[in-house]
Each structure stands twice: as structure tokens, then as C-alpha cells.
Image (cartoon, rainbow, N blue to C red):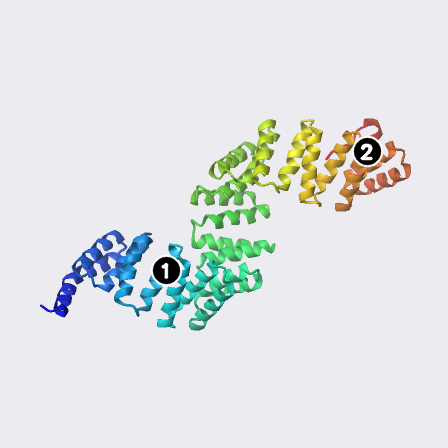
Amino acid sequence: MNVHTKVSQDREDSNPYFLEGNRYRVAGQLHEAVLSYQKAIKLDPLHSAAHFNLAGALHLLGMSQEALPHYREALRLKPNDAAVHFSVANVLGDLGNLDEAIEEYREAIRIDPSLVNAYVNLGNALASRGLLDAAIEMYQQAIQIDPEHAGAYFHLGNVFHTKDWVPEAIACWEHTISVNPDHGRAHFNLGSSFYNQGDLEKATYHYREAVRVNPEYADAHHYLADVLSDQGLVEEAIAEYKKAIRADGHHAPARNNLGLVLRLKGQLDAAIAQWEEAIRLQPSYAEAHHNLGAALFITGNAHMGIYELREAIRLQPDHVWAHFNLGVAYNMLGDIESAIANWQEALQLDPTLVGAHFNLGNAFYKRGQPEAAMAKWRETLEQDPDHPWANFNIGGTSRRLHQADVSAGLFERTTRIRSEVASRVFANTGSVPEA
């Protein structure tokens, strides 16, 4: 028997297993398909299609490392097959070998310049490498080949967004959903873009579309809840946060924000439970530590509250509100110096933080430094000219320092801003009211 005859006989013997593997693969029975393709290859090691389809089944099973040798063997047997180069590139990309993947995509395009998905995936690989302009060129070439390719428009929009070309990104994602109204990720990206622009109506619509397309889309439920919460739709927001958590039990941000709306409803114990769970899931989550710390302090657990606030700062030293609230906590415990230090740090991070200026003024006054106190209250007024308590405190302190003209003017201004503030008798109490 000559070599040609033997190969033909091997192919004839292996084909039933190859065809059986195809039937299993179409039926979604991938493990059975793998076994059938392996039998075909055992009988005919040169069966390129069997190697190719075995690799494809293994890839679908998430076994990229095992798939690669079979794709490479298919490529050795059929070096001019664009589809094989394309598939090899996909697996290499999954394995993190982007440079080799890029070369394989380019080879697939060289062999078959009409292979539109190779342009799209090459664009994705280039974008992952930070080569954004080269990625844009690939997506645009894909669109020239197929003007209605939803994936090309979607990924082009992603790169435009990375370059901060937001209007262009939105236009691409809108075109994506005009081609494919059920493109959930495009709806999600549009929702996020409109949310950032303050267009809550459009954001709500697109997030709702994203969860319609994929009811298990945890991030979409989460951000839809945020938008609903911003619109005061608290009950709907709670329902969406819970859907996000059902879809992804490890979604710490959804638990954190659910805690915030539960706190708004006065359900502080339930809110604390959510923040504790968020921290259990993500121990480095500074915002959850901050929220938990503030809540624990409110419930009377001062020392644990301070611990959590300090932990938030350790994890995120530039967390303005953690510094501010830690200052409030220390102030309530009578530790004026620690309060001052934290409010000063908050102002280093955000010089426009009105509450920190005002509270520092109060703290300086308590420390017996009325001039320093008035300086901070004046800075409060620079940020918020209608701040009634700052006006009132300056007026009262000026009066105590016998600065009558200043005092009278500021009391008059306070009366215009908020009459109930001026009705308090500062001279009789001998203390500065705090807000």
C-alpha cells in the first residue's frame, strides 16, 4: 500500500468519528465532541479539520492551553488557511500572548483581506497594547468591508472613549444598537456616558435596555440603581441593587450603595450589615470602611467607628470625607486637636470643602483663638456667601471682641438669609452654635 492509499484509508476510517464529533459539537455536547475528534486524530494524525475542530471544542470549554497545539498542527497542515491563523490568534490572545496574536491576525488578513472579524480582533489586540490609533484604523477597515458590523462600531466607540472623544464614542455605540438593538454592552456604555453627562432620563433608558437584554448583568443593575437613587426613586433603586447582588453575590459596590439608600430610609442596622458584607468581600474597599465607620459612630460605637474611618484613610489617604468625618468624630469625643488635624488634612485635599472651613472655625473658637476662628468662617463665606451660621458666628464673635460695626453688619446679613438663626441670643449663651 503506497502512502497516498494509506492516507486515504486512514481518512476513511477516521471520518465517522470526525462527523460524530461535529454532531456532538452542534448539539452543545462539547466533552463528547472532544472524545470523538481525538478518536479521529488517533486513526488519522494528518486530519487537519479534526485538529481544527478539536481545538475549537477545547477553546469553547475554556481549555485554551490544550487547544493551542491542535490549532498549531492544523496550521502546519494548512499554512495558507486564514481561518486557522485567525483561530490561533484568538487562543494566543486569550493566553495573553498579544504580540504573537497580532502577527497571526495580520497573516489571516494577508491571506484573506475580506476576513472582517480578523480586523476587529486585531483592533482589540492593538488597543490592549495601547496602540489606539492603529486599533482605530483596523476598526475603520472592518466597517469599510461590512458597514453594518455592530462589533466594529462597538469597539471603535470603546477606543474613542479611551481617548476621551466622548461624542464620537456615543455616536458609535448608538450606531451599534441601531444595527443590533440587543447589544447589551453598548446600551450599558451609553447609559454610563449619559449618566456622566447628567442626562438621567437617557441613562435610565439604556441601563434598563441593558438588563432587558441580559437580566443577569450585575453592573447594569447596579448603575441603574444608582441612577434611580439619584432621582429619588429609592424603592426602585433598592430592588435593582438586590438584583445586582443576586446576579453577582460578590458585587461589593452594589452592597455599599444599597447600604447608602437603606441609611436614607433610616434602616441603619440593615445598612451596616451591607457595608460589613462589602468589606468581607473586598477588604480594601475604602468607601465601605468610611460608610461603616460613620454609621458605627452614629449608633454610639465610637471606637469602632473611628477605627473604620482610620482604616478608610489608610487604604485611601486622599479620601476627603473620611478625614472630614474622622474630624467630626474626634470633635464629638472632645479631642479638638485630632479634629483640627483631620479637617486641615481634608482642606489640603479639597480647599473648597465648606464644612471643614466652618468646623475649623468652631474648633479654633473653642481653643480660645477667636481671630483664627473668624478667619476660617470668612473662608467659609468665600466658598458659600450665604452660609448663615458663618455669618452669625462672625457677628457674635466680633461683638465679643467689641468690633461693633462688623457685628451689626453680619447680624443684619444673617437675618436676611435665615431669620431663625438671628433669633438665637448669642451673647446670653456665650458659645458658638455649630451646624
Mark 2: secondary structure: helix
Q: Name the quadrant containing residue 327.
A: top right
- Tell me the residue that label 1 is attached to: 90
Q: Is residue 324 visible?
A: yes
Q: Is residue 300 visible?
A: no
Residue 146 position (above or below residue 306): below
- Tell me the residue that label 2 is attached to: 370
Which of the two discs, 2 and 1, sits closer to the camera?
1
Q: Residues within 10 Å of mark 1 (few under 14, many from 20)?
A: many
Residue at image location 59% in from the left, 38% down from the top:
313
Check the picture and name the quadrant holding the C terminus: top right
Check the picture and name the quadrant holding the N terminus: bottom left
174 displayed left or right of 42: right
Q: Name the quadrant containing residue 80.
A: bottom left
Question: Which sits in the foreground, 241 or 362?
Answer: 362
Mark 1: secondary structure: helix
Give whichever of discs 2 and 1 has the lower sequence position.
1
| Residue 249 in picture, x, y percent from top left | 44, 41
Count every numbered label the image shows and give the total.
Answer: 2
| Residue 404 in picture, x, y percent from top left | 90, 36
CB atoms at circles 2 and 1 under 8 Å apart? no
The answer for how far apart the CA atoms under marks 2 and 1 are is: 70 Å
Amino acid type of the residue that numbered disc 2 sits on in the rendered structure: Pro
Amino acid type of the residue that numbered disc 1 sits on in the rendered structure: Asn
Residue 214 position (above or below residue 251): below
| Residue 10 in picture, x, y percent from top left | 14, 63
Residue at image location 51% in from the left, 61% down from the top:
159
Say which mark, if any, is on residue 141: none
Residue at image location 30% in from the left, 69% down from the top:
81
Question: Which sits in the foreground, 263 or 138?
Answer: 138
| Residue 319 in picture, x, y percent from top left | 61, 41
Q: Residues within 10 Å of mark 2 (few under 14, many from 20)?
A: many
